[in-house]
Amino acid sequence: MTKAGPIAYLTGEYPRATDTFIQREVAGLRALGMQVETCSIRRTDPSHHVGIEQQTEAANTFHVLDAAKNPMRLLHAHISLFAQNPRRYFGAFSQAWRTRAPGVKAATYQMIYFAEAGVLARHMQERGITHLHNHIATASCTVAMIASALSGVPYSFTLHGPDIFFEPHRWRLDAKIASARFVACISHFCRAQAMNFSGAEHWGKLHIVHCGIEPDRYTPTPRKRGKQLLFVGRLAAVKGVPVLLDALKMLGEHDGLTLTFIGDGPEREALEKQAAQMGLAGMTKFVGYKNQSEVAEALASTDVFVLPSFAEGVPVVLMEAMAAAVPVITTHVAGVPELVEDGVHGILTHAGDSTSLANAIDALLSDPVMAERMGRAGREKVSAAFNIAHETAWLAELLDAYEKTDADMPVRREP
């Protein structure tokens, strides 16, 4: 296979402890022989750099906003782009203006995105980048779209959700799909939403590329089952943590029950206080962000993984738990049922319903045979359909095919 590249990867913040799947994807493409340079709009807080891998990635990432804050660099980038091709420059400005959201504030932000896009476009030209790929189709993808128009470097993006589907018109998902070379959708649900917000003439370039994990990193080891619950994710309202605390309160008859929260976020302090007020301080532990190895260690001693989110794409943390042969309890939202089949790999509950969540936890804790069976089935599922090695190979195939021509590629290549 001819290797496309060098390519640039762009996200709003890279690397982040909550987005390790992007880091895995970059590593997977590099392992296939592709030259991948990482770019980030903002510099991530050091608290996200929870391992040597992320520290190394952060040190080698180009930070767009930092560069754009240098007046001379910003001016030089835009003057150079204008001098190269005035028509293309004004075309990109016109595109940026047409795709702004309504309102003065939105127009101001769009001009900031245009300024950042100029810095990114010039950086790509200087580095000889032949393709730009973006993750998360909101603000950073707006920068990617404009940078592509300014530089002539084609771009693609990975569409996740759920945020983008709440405001698809504000973020001009239709324009991004139309101008992108192709779109990697993380699930069938995600692809269907993309089809809903784009013209039928663009549906052929919407391909399903799962986020993935390294199953061997989570190989389960024999252990005695107990009553340890684990949550991994941002401590924010959308993850349903208050509902989980309510469910935990209902399960007081389970002696020795504990719940560990791995992650951080804007509501951590309030949630810790809520747990204490509910009399759950002795049963709950909030341990902050952990690196991939530490998460794998936690999963190795966990009996049930719980993620009661109100909205999701296809959560990578569920894949990690399933790879560790841990039965999962989560909610029936968006693309989650494409990963977790109710009663096979775990239990799907109603989002926001603490009673059904408590009943699901009780069922798995009370039936270790069922829990073990679901754990084994979950590992088989993610090893076959959500293996990062397979998914990055499929993405590389798409990048290579579209580099050669406007390819007629299948929606999904099955393992």
Image (tube, grey):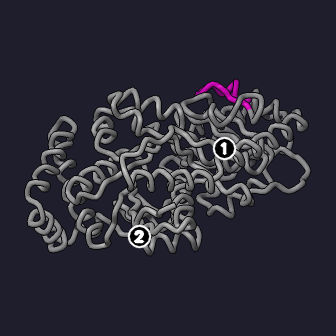
Is 374 left or right of 157, judged from the image as shown? right
Residue in view at x 12 percent, y 65 percent:
84
Residue 318 visible in image: no
Residue 328 horizontal/vertical position (percent): 72, 39
Image quarter (top left, top right, bottom left or bottom right) of the C terminus: top right
The reply to whether callout 2 and callout 1 are in contact (CB within 8 Å) is no
Say whether residue 209 is magenta: no
Q: Which-is-in-front pick, marks 2 and 1?
A: 1
Q: Secondary structure at mark 2?
A: loop
Q: Nearer the viewer, residue 42 or 28?
A: 28
Residue in view at x 40 percent, y 33 percent:
203
Q: Looking at the image, is 316 positioned above or below residue 287?
A: above
Cα separation, mark 2 vs mark 1, equals 30 Å
Q: Residues within 10 Å of mark 2 (few under 14, many from 20)?
A: some
Q: Secondary structure at mark 1?
A: helix
Is 329 left or right of 40, judged from the image as shown? right
Q: Looking at the image, is 303 positioned above or below residue 14?
A: above
Q: Which mark is residue 385?
A: 1
**Who comes first in sequence, dot 2 or dot 1?**
2
Q: Amino acid at mark 2?
A: Thr
Is 310 left or right of 72, judged from the image as shown? right
Q: Which residue is mark 2?
A: 61
Q: Which region shows up in magenta? A: 347-358
Q: Amino acid at mark 1?
A: Ala
Residue in view at x 48 percent, y 66 percent:
34
Q: Which mark is residue 98?
A: none
Residue in view at x 19 percent, y 72 percent:
73
